[in-house]
Amino acid sequence: MVLMRYALAAALGLMMTLALLLGMHGLITSSGGAEPDRSLRKIADIWQPQRTIEEQRKIVRPEKPREAERPPPPMPDLQVNVETPKGTVDMMTPSMEGLQVGLGGSFTRDSDYIPVYVPQPDYPPMALRQGVEGYAVVEVVITVTGSVRDVKLLEESPANKGFGKYALRAAEKLKYKPRVIDGKAEEVPGVLYKFSFQIAR
C-alpha cells in the first residue's frame, strides 16, 4: 500500500512538472514569434507654424536742439544816494593852560609824549544830527610796551552829547613810544590827550 502511494504521488508530480514545462514553452514561442511590420507604424507629423521673422529697426530721431536759455532781462540801474555826514575829528594834544585837572603821580608835559598811532574815533550820532561840535580830554597810563591802560575821561564839552564816550573808545587804542631809562622801559602815568570833534563845513 505504501509503495502504491509513493508511486501515485510521483506520477502526479511528474505530470504537473510536464504541464508547467509545456506552458512555459508555449509562452516563449508565442512571444518570440515574427516581428511585427514596422512599416505599418506611422509617426505623427510634427507641424510647426510658419514664422515670419520681421526685422525691427528702431529709428532714433535726433533730438531737437534746446533753445539757448535766454539771459534774464537786464535789471534797471538802481541808484542809491547815501549821504555820508561830513564829520571830521581833529585830534591834538591838549593845552594845559587854563585846564584845571587834578593829576595823580608825576606831571607829564604834552610835548614829551606824542602818540605814534591815533585811532579815528566815531562822531557821536546825536551831536552829528544836532550839528554840535565839541571835545573830550582823556588820561592814560603808557605801559612798557607803548600801549595804554587805565583810560579815564577828565573832561568833555558839551556834556551828554557822547563826546566823552567815543573819545574813551578811541583812547584805548592809542600807541606811544615806550619811555626807556638806562635801557629799561618804564610806565608813564598821567598822560593827557584831547579829541576835538568838528563838522566839516
Image (cartoon, rainbow, N blue to C red):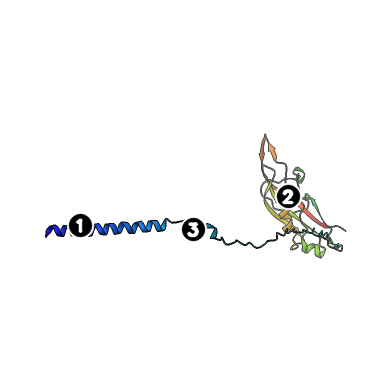
Please report whichever mark, 3 or 2, sits nearer to the chain's N-terminal start. 3
* Mark before the other along the chain sequence, 3 or 1: 1
**Residue farthest along the top direction in this orientation:** 182
Left or right of 102? Residue 88 is: right
Tell me which amino acid carries mark 3.
Answer: Pro
Give residue 160's mark: none
- Give the image location of residue 35, x and y in percent: 47, 56
For label 1, the residue is: 10
- Tell me which residue sits at (18%, 60%) in the image: 8
Q: Nearer the viewer, residue 190 or 98?
A: 190
- Asked whether the residues under the numbered discs 3 and 1 touch, taking CB atoms below 8 Å apart as contact, a structural biologist would say no
Q: Which is more toward the observer, 23 or 52?
A: 23
Question: Which is in the foreground here, disc 3 or disc 2?
Answer: 3
Query: Which callout, 2 or 1, points to the residue nearer the camera?
Result: 1
Q: In the figure, 3 relative to 107: above or below?
A: below
Q: Which mark is residue 192?
A: 2
* Distance Cα–Cα, label 2 vs label 1: 163 Å
In the picture, measured across the screen, residue 64 lies left or right of residue 179, that is: right
Q: Nearer the viewer, residue 77 or 154?
A: 77
